[in-house]
Image: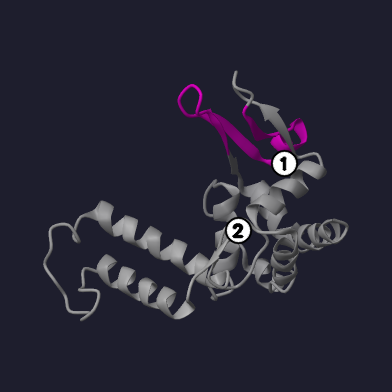
Amino acid sequence: MKQFDLEKLEKAIIYTERMADGRAPYSNQPIENEVLNNPNVIRSMYFIKEVLQEVKKNGGVVGSKGIKQQKNTVEMAAHFPFEVLDKFSYESNKPISLVLKQFVELTGKPDVSIISAVAVNKWLGANGYLERIVINAEGKENWSPTDKGVALGMISEKRGDPGREYIRIEYNKEAQEFLAYNLRRITEESLESRDKI
């Protein structure tokens, strides 16, 4: 694991955002630049900004999380303001990461901690909605909805080229409402299971 200087990280976020907005990173002056005005470059810069913000949110630490850090992440997620989920309204079918992102957006605080998609998948697996299956000849495994998960509203599709296949799972209106209704329980039970590690 490596830890970055948070002050430098903050500058990197600012510079990246300025370039994504078509401005010079140091002077913040608008600039006409064919590269910086390219939509693909703009999207890439915003993606880089998001990654840098995640590193900042993680205290500047990059690398795999140890058990203690994993527990702390779930403990922080336990303080999520679950009452905002009463305002949840379905927009479209989407994968779990985007459902959780929408939950965070309801708080109006983009840095608020919420349980990870990995932890939600583990909870759904432990409760019979998902299962790990082998999806190719190389033995690659992926989560896939069980009959119970399909009945809940999980829609899956196998994607990717041979050898690089994966299963994309989207959640329909009923499945998203289930997650919104049960997020506190999912978070608390995930915390309890981590405490047993």
Q: State the mark number for residue 152.
A: 1
Image-quadrant location for residue 127:
top right
Of the residues under marks 1 and 2, which one precedes in the sequence? 2
Image-quadrant location for residue 109:
bottom right
The alpha-carbon separation of the residues under discs 1 and 2 comes to 17 Å
Quarter the C terminus occupies: bottom right
Horizontal arrangement in the rendering, residue 108 relative to residue 146 (left or right) = left
Name the amino acid type tagged 1: Leu
Residue 6: x %, y % from top left: 48, 77
Residue at horizontal 74%, vertical 47%? 122
Q: Which residue is mark 2?
A: 100
Note whether 155 is above or below 93 in the view shown: above
Q: Which segment did they paint magenta?
A: 140-168
Q: Nearer the viewer, residue 128 or 191?
A: 191
Residue 128: x %, y % from top left: 80, 39
Q: Nearer the observer, disc 1 or disc 2?
A: 2
Q: Residues within 10 Å of mark 1 (few under 14, many from 20)?
A: some
Q: Nearer the viewer, residue 159 or 52?
A: 52
Q: Is residue 148 magenta?
A: yes
Quarter the N terminus occupies: bottom right
Residue 101: x %, y % from top left: 55, 60
Q: Nearer the viewer, residue 86 or 168?
A: 168
Residue at horizontal 71%, vertical 70%? 82
SS at circle 2: helix
